[in-house]
Image (cartoon, grey):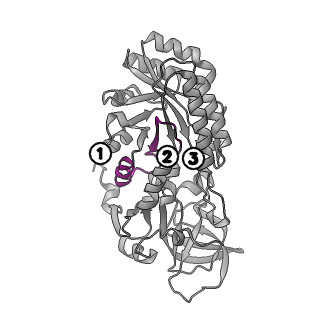
Amino acid sequence: MSEYYSVKTSFYGKHCPHDLVKRFGSPVYIYNERIFRERCREMAGLVSYPNFRANYSIKANSNLELLKIAREEGMLVDAMSPGEIYVLEAAGYQANEIFYISNNVSAEEMKFAVDRGILVSIDSLSQLKLFGRINPGGKVAVRFNPGIGAGHHEKVMTAGKKTKFGVNMDFVSEVKGILKEYDLKLAGINQHIGSLFLEGNAYLESVNSILSIAKQFEDLEFVDLGGGFGIPYHKQEGQERLDLSMLGESLTKLLLQWSEQYGKNVLFKIEPGRYIAAECGALLGTVHAIKQNYGTNYVGTDMGFNVLARPVMYDSHHDIEVYKNSDISGANEEMVANIVGNICESGDIIARGRRLQKVEEGDILGVMDAGAYGYSMASNYNNRLRPAEVLIRESGEAVLIRKRDTLEDLIRNFII
């Protein structure tokens, strides 16, 4: 097993996991500001094309402090609900920095964005007609499905021939007809092929597809190439990172060539999604029970799927780090075990058959690369409390950026 990611990156700053759990409670989400900023900068500088921006996807992690940092780093943002728009505005984002990517929404939701001057992306012909009735003569974007998908699980593929997203790329003439009928100005087109690609060929293929659609429309302001940029979740097995240098060079060549043919340096955008937030986050939890059931070892923790849903939803892998309660106990021993949570469901499993340094009650476990789709998908299932969120500043200091739920929070909105 390779050296722990947290050690190589000084992830916890001036603190050790046991101290953080003692101070902020267990379980707890820990974010590293330096890593978050580095990932923002990598995406912002991906290509050398002069008119290029990266969007931060609030759905990956909506903590207000991280959103403020993303804005400081020059990230634009995409939102998928009025709630996300509201939180982005609270973080300081202006209307021209927010892209509302709608999916099967009501007229009221569309108006929520339109009334704020936020550009709306539409992903079906029927919704484009609805938008035209709501905002005739307005500016709009259309999300196309290039027929190419990518991702580690079918549930995270957002393009291809078996997904609900986007307008079929064969319906360009129908889109033009609706735009003309309602006197709509097409500002741009966008796509998103899925989440977690680590090899750039599928993405480049999808870029070629969206550019072939884009050239069928005159005077576009932007083309959003989408994203799904992956991170190596299997670091302990030596999984390679996405080769950004090679991807960036290939993208730059494509964009420069296309814009020259189009006759305009349109704005190109990407949506790296999890790439920015995932590696900056770890979930710390406490081991409360060790047991064996019919030959299988179980490590029982306070990290149920109410806290981290990805493994039970997508069979997702997260590297696990063991932080011993004692420097002596079990230091040179190993065990193979299922790591499970405290939710009353058989599927409440963080990791199956994982080989680890021997774990004992009182040890702390770190679930790594949990910054994206961790807290944002957390719930109060079983009336469990959602954890605190803590930011390790670039100085190494730890600051609380969201309080842990209280029992009172569980009944706050009931009408008694």
Residue that lies at the very extreme toward the top in this rendered image: 181
Mark 3, other Cα within 10 Å: few <14 / some 14–19 / many ≥20: many
| Residue 72 pos. (x, y %) | 35, 49
Residue that lies at the very extreme toward the right in this rendered image: 295
| Residue 102 pos. (x, y %) | 46, 32
Q: Nearer the viewer, mark 1 or mark 3?
A: 3
Which residue carries the number 2 mark?
45
Q: How many marks?
A: 3
Q: Residue drawn 65% across and 31% down?
A: 147
Closer-to-camera residue (60/379): 60
Disc 1 residue type (three-letter): Ala
Q: CA distance from mark 2 to mark 1?
A: 27 Å
* The N terminus: image quadrant: bottom right
Whichever of labels 3 and 2 marks the residue nearer the N terminus, that label is 2
Q: Are marks 2 and 1 in contact (CB under 8 Å)?
A: no
Disc 3 residue type (three-letter): Phe
Disc 2 residue type (three-letter): Gly
Q: CA distance from mark 1 to mark 3?
A: 27 Å
Mark 1, other Cα within 10 Å: few <14 / some 14–19 / many ≥20: few
Q: Which mark is residue 118?
A: none
In magenta stretch: residue 60? yes
- Badge 3 marks a residue whose secondary structure is loop
Q: Residue drawn 39% across and 76% down?
A: 22
Q: Nearer the viewer, mark 2 or mark 1?
A: 2
- The region drawn magenta spans 47-73
